[in-house]
Amino acid sequence: MIATAVAALLHAQEESASPAAEKKSYPEVPKEYEVGESTVSPDGRFAILYEVRDEDSNVDPGLPNQLVRLKPYAVLKEIETGDGVTWKGGRGAADAKWNGNDWVAVWHHRKWGDEDLVVYEIENDEVKRVQKIWPEIVKYFDRDFHERFLKKYPKEFDSYTFVSDSDVKELEFKEHKLLLDIFADNKPNLAAGPHWTAELKAVWDLKQAKFEKVDFKPGKIEVRKEIE
């Protein structure tokens, strides 16, 4: 009787485990790629693919991330690559956040923060519209950095960095809106010298494909001293 009960229990466990195992099995995905489990859409139909990392050589094959339909398998969009690698967890790899199963925000992880925000609208298993939001965000930071900072300190490097804060929700969907909170710093490594920061809080209207509201907050410009 004990053996029968154990066998029945094991069988029940196998049955309960099989759906989860099936969800994580993607036989149609090319062997060069793996599925980013955290990027799978709520209905389980779409996801971001990452190139498989060769742990031995650690050489980047240079394959782009892809937005795909998992079953039946189809590539919906090849995601533009920037600097860095595109394997899972790599600096330069894409990540995703879904709004239902129709909208997905995709961005790239960099050294200090996330950049290159794009929103894809999916309809009938195809990418219906691509909204490249990042260039619109950068315009505000570029204007302030050049007009308020570089005019005062023209010998400084013409560059700044977007920085992520673990305590801040940089992007969040709310119905057909995308709420943004983006921060930039010209010396996130705490280097000495003229220091500039700025923050943008905005609402992007997904239906209109434009900003509904923008609150750009220039930070105080100061000169840091060398750390003794």
Image (cartoon, rainbow, N blue to C red):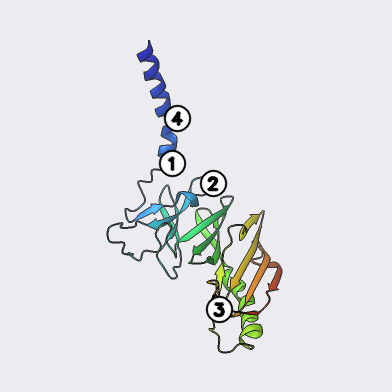
- Tell me how far mark 1 sits from mark 4, CA to CA: 12 Å
Kindly identify the amino acid type of the residue bearing the numbered disc 2: Pro
Q: Residue at x 40, y 65 (%)?
A: 85
- In this view, the residue in front, 193 or 50, is 193
Compared to 214, does 2 lie above or below?
above
User: How would you rate the neighbour count of disc 4 (Cα within 10 Å): few for under 14, some for 14-19, many for 20 or more?
Assistant: few
Residue 140 image position (x, y, % from top left) = 64, 76
- In this view, the residue in front, 125 or 228, is 228
Q: Secondary structure at mark 3?
A: loop
User: How would you rate the neighbour count of disc 1 (Cα within 10 Å): few for under 14, some for 14-19, many for 20 or more?
Assistant: few
Q: Residue furthest front?
A: 228
Kindly identify the amino acid type of the residue bearing the numbered disc 4: Ser
Q: Secondary structure at mark 2?
A: loop
Residue 128 image position (x, y, % from top left) = 54, 60
Q: Secondary structure at mark 1?
A: helix
> Where the N terminus falls, by quadrant?
top left
Q: Nearer the viewer, mark 3 or mark 2?
A: 3
Q: Which residue is mark 4?
A: 16
Q: Nearer the viewer, mark 4 or mark 3?
A: 3
- In this view, the residue in front, 28 or 53, is 53
Q: Residue at x 44, y 62 (%)?
A: 93
First in residue order: circle 1 vs circle 2:
1
User: How would you rate the neighbour count of disc 3 (Cα within 10 Å): few for under 14, some for 14-19, many for 20 or more?
Assistant: few
Q: Residue at x 41, y 68 (%)?
A: 84
- Image quadrant in which you'd find residue 154: bottom right
- Are discs 3 and 2 less than 8 Å apart at CB? no
Q: Which residue is mark 1?
A: 23
- Tell me how far mark 1 sits from mark 2, CA to CA: 12 Å
Compared to 179, does 188 lie above or below?
below
Residue 152 image position (x, y, % from top left) = 64, 88
Kindly identify the amino acid type of the residue bearing the numbered disc 1: Lys
Residue 122 image position (x, y, % from top left) = 54, 56
